[in-house]
Amino acid sequence: MSYYNQKYDYTAETLSAQDETNMFLKKYQAQAELSKHKMYARMPKFHMGRMQDYDPYSPTTTIEFEREPMVEMYIPQDKFRDLVERDRWIGRLEGEAEYYRKRYMQEMEDDKIRHRNPAVMKAWQQYQMLLELVR
C-alpha cells in the first residue's frame, strides 16, 4: 500500500470546540475571559451599488460597525514560550514533509518516463554505473 493510498478512520469522535478550548487552557495553564474594555470593530462590506452612493466626506454619511467582544488570555511566560516553540517545530516538520513529498513525486515521474522510453532507461543505467565507478 503506497503513502497516498492509505485509508484513515474518520469515524473517531471529534471534540467540540469548547472541549478543545478547555484542553488548551489546561495544557498551557491559561486563563481566558471576555474583555471588558476592548472591542473588535468590523467595517461592513460594501457592494458595488452601495459604494457608488458612499461619500465619506458627507456629514450625513454614517457607517455602522459591528462590535464583537474580544477575548483576553493570560498565559505564563514559560508556557507561552513552549507554545511558540511548538508552532515553530510543527512549521519545520510541515516544510520537510512538503519537500519530501515533492521529491517523491518527482522520483515517481522520472520512473514513469524511464519505463516508457527504453533509450532513457539505458542512459539512466549508464549514468548510474558511472556514478558507482566514481565512488
Image: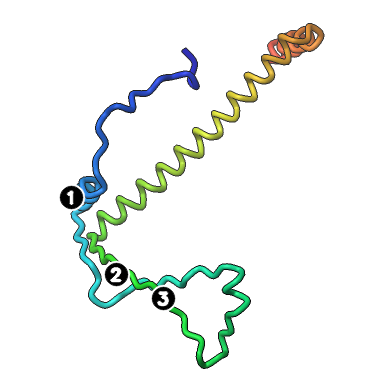
Q: How is the image coloured?
A: rainbow
Give the mark nearest the N terminus, 2 or 1.
Answer: 1
Report whether 123 appears left or right of 7. Answer: right
Viewer can see residue 133: no
Mark 2 burial class by Cα count in 10 Å: few <14, some 14-19, many 20+:
few
Where does the image place residue 42, in percent across and percent down from the top left?
Answer: 42, 70
Disc 2 residue type (three-letter): Pro
Identity of the residue drawn at 50% across and 35% down = 96
The quarter holding residue 55 reads bottom right
| Residue in front for this viewpoint, 23 or 69 | 69
| Residue in front for this viewpoint, 45 or 5 | 45
Where does the image place residue 43, in percent across and percent down from the top left?
Answer: 46, 72
Q: Which residue is mark 2?
A: 69
Identity of the residue drawn at 38% across and 72% down = 66
Disc 1 residue type (three-letter): Lys
Q: Secondary structure at mark 2?
A: strand
Identity of the residue drawn at 77% across and 9% down = 126
Report whether 116 appears left or right of 23. Answer: right
Of badges 3 and 1, the one in the foreground is 3
Disc 3 residue type (three-letter): Phe
Q: Secondary structure at mark 1?
A: helix
Which numbered dot is residue 26? 1
Q: Which residue is mark 3?
A: 65
Mark 1 burial class by Cα count in 10 Å: few <14, some 14-19, many 20+:
few
